[in-house]
């Protein structure tokens, strides 16, 4: 899709596509293409491969980077992710060949996974008491792209290249901010899990200095560290701990498989990740076929990111598993309403009613999506945290490859029915999750979020 080219009025869309889009509607694709002077050129395969390469990049990243982060720490890969993003944005500005874009899109897929599964997890370990809030704010800002991008293109400039320059500026600013201003430390939990006490103390001193901690607070933290180390020594012999530290990633996964509770939770989390990811991506492809106004449905889909801010409000009263259950229940209820609409039981309800139903359904999906990231902290030890993210996302990314195909099923009730069935299964899986006992780490987590 690029600026310039022929007039869409010269093409007989109705004779080429079978769809439910009203081309005469003021919000139809024809009008968007006309206003922005867009023209799709080139082979359809060339265009479709852009999405495929990004998904492939995400799939590879899920298998490679989270296990490496468990071995070498979160900080290194947080900066690697920002570096990859910067490389992509520079490449998008410098090169104009689609072959180069394929490589850049593949690299971008890797950077996206590093950001979600490693950088966000790294940040959450610093803000133990505000995990839901911080994650919710970031995902909320991500989701706002679907709202302000169309407005930016419609009323300010008609070139998407401005977005690339903005993204490059934000990426460079983030590297400068974290690398040279705040000197982002390593994960405190990771340092403790690796028994690197000197590294932990140096990073904690820096955090205390940044937060202007009192001497009393510093002494309290030191006492907690000593207590934690004593507990670790009582649980494990030093020789066994050293052997554990030297285990390769393959051996670590083998150990994980022997941990029945972690394996049990991992299997259930894979089910929830598959359901939520498939639903999230299926809606992206299905929205153009849903009843009502295409423009209204897309805007409603964007505003549903309010779900990312609802979760932090519920966090003080409910644990992450219960919030997940609430999100799934909301999604299921309004998926049933959407299914009734598709089967003509609610056909007379009107487009506005459907948009409200769609908004509430997507809000439930957003609530589950943020909970999926945060709940790993409650289910898996720090040593397997990034690996658990990687395994869940590897399986879910493979499953979502079928989402674009499901969206094209002529009977629109079938994709909605698939989402409904998956969310019911995920609801059951989330119900049986076993939250680990994290009381021993609670005080240290609180200290790390001064």
Image: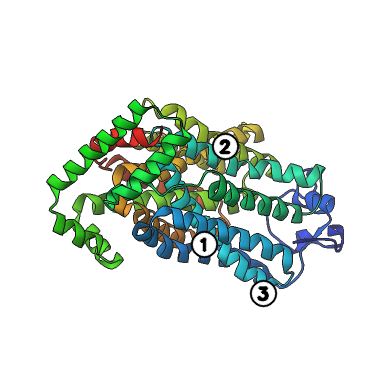
The circle on residue 304 is 2
Residue at the (48%, 40%) spot, across then down: 135
Circle 1 crowding by C-alpha within 10 Å: few under 14, some 14–19, many from 20: many
- Residue at label 1? 110
Cβ–Cβ under 8 Å for marks 3 and 2: no
Circle 2 crowding by C-alpha within 10 Å: few under 14, some 14–19, many from 20: many
In the picture, measured across the screen, residue 294 lies left or right of residue 76, that is right
**View extreme (front): residue:** 215
Residue at the (44%, 63%) spot, across then down: 398
Q: Which of the image's four quarters has the N terminus?
A: bottom right
The answer to whether residue 362 of the structure is visible from this angle is yes
Q: CA distance from mark 3 to mark 2?
A: 35 Å
Mark toward the start of the polypeptide (3 vs 1): 3
Is 339 above or below relative to 196? above
Q: Say which of 139 and 411 sits in front.
A: 139
For label 1, the SS is helix
Cβ–Cβ under 8 Å for marks 3 and 1: no
Q: CA distance from mark 2 to mark 1?
A: 26 Å
Residue at the (77%, 47%) spot, across then down: 153
């Amino acid at each position: 899709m690029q600026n310039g080219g022929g007039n869409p009025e010269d093409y007989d869309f109705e004779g080429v596509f079978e769809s439910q889009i009203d081309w005469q509607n003021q919000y139809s694709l024809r009008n968007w293409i006309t206003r922005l002077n867009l023209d799709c050129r080139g082979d359809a395969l060339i265009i479709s491969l852009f999405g495929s390469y990004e998904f492939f990049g995400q799939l590879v990243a899920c298998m490679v980077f989270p296990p490496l982060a468990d071995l070498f720490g979160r900080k290194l890969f947080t900066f690697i992710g920002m570096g990859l993003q910067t490389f992509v944005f520079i490449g998008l500005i410098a090169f104009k060949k689609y072959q180069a874009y394929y490589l850049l899109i593949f690299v971008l897929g890797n950077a996206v996974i590093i950001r979600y599964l490693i950088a966000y997890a790294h940040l959450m370990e610093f803000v133990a008491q505000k995990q839901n809030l911080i994650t919710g704010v970031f995902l909320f800002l991500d989701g706002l792209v679907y709202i302000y991008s169309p407005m930016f293109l419609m009323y300010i400039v008609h070139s998407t290249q401005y977005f690339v320059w903005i993204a490059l500026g934000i990426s460079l600013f983030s590297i400068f901010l974290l690398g040279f201003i705040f000197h982002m430390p390593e994960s405190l939990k990771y340092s403790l899990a690796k028994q690197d006490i000197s590294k932990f103390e140096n990073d904690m001193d820096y955090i205390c200095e940044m937060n202007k901690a009192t001497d009393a607070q510093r002494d309290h933290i030191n006492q907690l560290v000593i207590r934690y180390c004593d507990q670790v020594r009582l649980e494990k012999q030093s020789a066994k701990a050293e052997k554990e530290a030297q285990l390769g990633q393959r051996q670590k996964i083998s150990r994980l498989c022997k941990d029945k509770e972690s394996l049990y939770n991992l299997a259930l989390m894979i089910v929830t990740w598959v359901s939520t990811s498939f639903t999230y991506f299926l809606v992206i492809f299905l929205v153009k076929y849903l009843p009502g106004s295409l423009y209204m449905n897309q805007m409603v889909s964007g505003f549903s990111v309010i779900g990312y801010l609802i979760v932090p409000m519920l966090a003080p009263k409910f644990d992450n598993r219960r919030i997940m259950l609430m999100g799934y229940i909301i999604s299921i209820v309004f998926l049933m309403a959407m299914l009734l609409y598709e089967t003509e039981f609610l056909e007379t309800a009107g487009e506005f009613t459907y948009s409200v139903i769609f908004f509430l359904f997507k809000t439930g999906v957003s609530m589950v999506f943020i909970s999926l990231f945060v709940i790993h902290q409650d289910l898996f030890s720090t040593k397997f945290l990034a690996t658990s993210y990687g395994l869940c996302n590897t399986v879910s990314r493979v499953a979502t490859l079928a989402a674009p195909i499901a969206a094209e099923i002529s009977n629109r009730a079938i994709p909605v029915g698939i989402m409904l069935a998956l969310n019911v299964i995920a609801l059951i899986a989330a119900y049986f999750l076993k939250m680990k006992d994290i009381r021993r780490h609670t005080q240290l987590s609180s200290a790390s979020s001064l």
